[in-house]
Image (cartoon, helix red, strand yellow):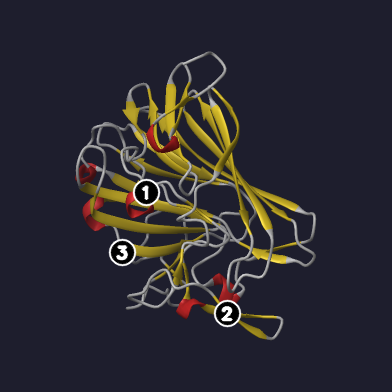
Amino acid sequence: MSADRPERGAGGIVSLAGETSSAEVSPRAASLRALRVRGLDLVEPTARFAEPPGMAGAVLVPWPNRVADAHWRYDGAEQRLKVTEPELGHANHGLLAAHDFTVRAASAASVTLTAPVTGHPGYPFDLDVAVTYRLRPDGIEVATAFANRGDRPAPVASGAHPYPRVGLAPTETLALRLDAPSARVPGPTHLPGPSFDVTGTVYDLRTGAPFAKLPRHLTYELADTGKPSRHRLSAPDGTAVELHADGHHRWFQLYIAEGLPTDEGPRPAVAVEPMTAPPNALRTGEGLRWIEPDETWTVRWGLSLIEPGS
């Protein structure tokens, strides 16, 4: 690899490298497929797969999670989206989960991938989406930018689907601290119920909980303070991976995959998904950002290695 250009592998995978960190990014859904700091994996590695298994590392735009029954209303008219979860009838994970982004700019330690959102049934808006991954000595920073190229305001929400990991520590030995005071339990069609205070319940993860006691599927909600948040998945020796997100990311989807396909074979995995709106936002309007024509909106999150005692 040259000093100023990343390597390109099979399937267009872009390999980034710094002095202490490295990452692999796939054009498919602009997905983060590997992240290592000082030789420790900070996400479940999935670079061998053409499609991100379990949506591993995928960017979810222009909405994360589900739109119930794949339809919503805009300006008095019903909008019909493509059904991407046929067993439940929902539109899931936005419009670009099965789309290849284009690498627009790259250096040894950063890459920007872009894709248009245009001409999709049920979403009559024109956007340009740019996702930038930038290595840090202790991890990675991710910025997702939405530019409205249309002539009317566009409803937008952003999400990502990382599966954090702490090196070689078995998933069953990990503990998660998720600093959220409220949650929503999904129903039989995976759409969440009303928000409730987690204080005094088994869903309260603010002081941490071991893997065995983690909810298998839950939407967590932060207070609307505009401040960034930090959450940790920790190994018994105190080593941890920290997910940090800006104040736009008020919702986090927790999902346990019992056998996520990885480059090392199937294994239990913990997804902690930062989102700027909750599930079903196109129908409820909750958390949506309406971007004006010619406006650009950028959101940021990232992952970092935390050493024992930090």
CA separation in Å, label 1 and label 3: 31 Å
Question: Where is residue 182 shown, x and y percent of the image?
Answer: 46, 65
Question: Residue at image x 36%, y 74%?
Answer: 86
Q: Secondary structure at mark 3?
A: loop
Q: Which of the numbered marks, if any, corresponds to residue 202?
A: 3
Report which residue position mark 2 lands on: 72
Q: Kindly give the residue lying farthest to the top in the view shown.
A: 3
C-beta proximity under 8 Å, tags 1 and 3:
no
On screen, residue 265 versus residue 25, left or right, reads: left
Vertical arrangement, residue 3 with respect to residue 22, above or below:
above
Question: Residue at image x 48%, y 49%?
Answer: 29
Report which residue position mark 1 lands on: 52
Question: Where is residue 147 shown, x and y percent of the image?
Answer: 71, 52
Q: Amino acid at mark 2?
A: Trp
Vertical arrangement, residue 181 with respect to residue 185, above or below:
above
On screen, residue 75 versus residue 37, left or right, reads: right
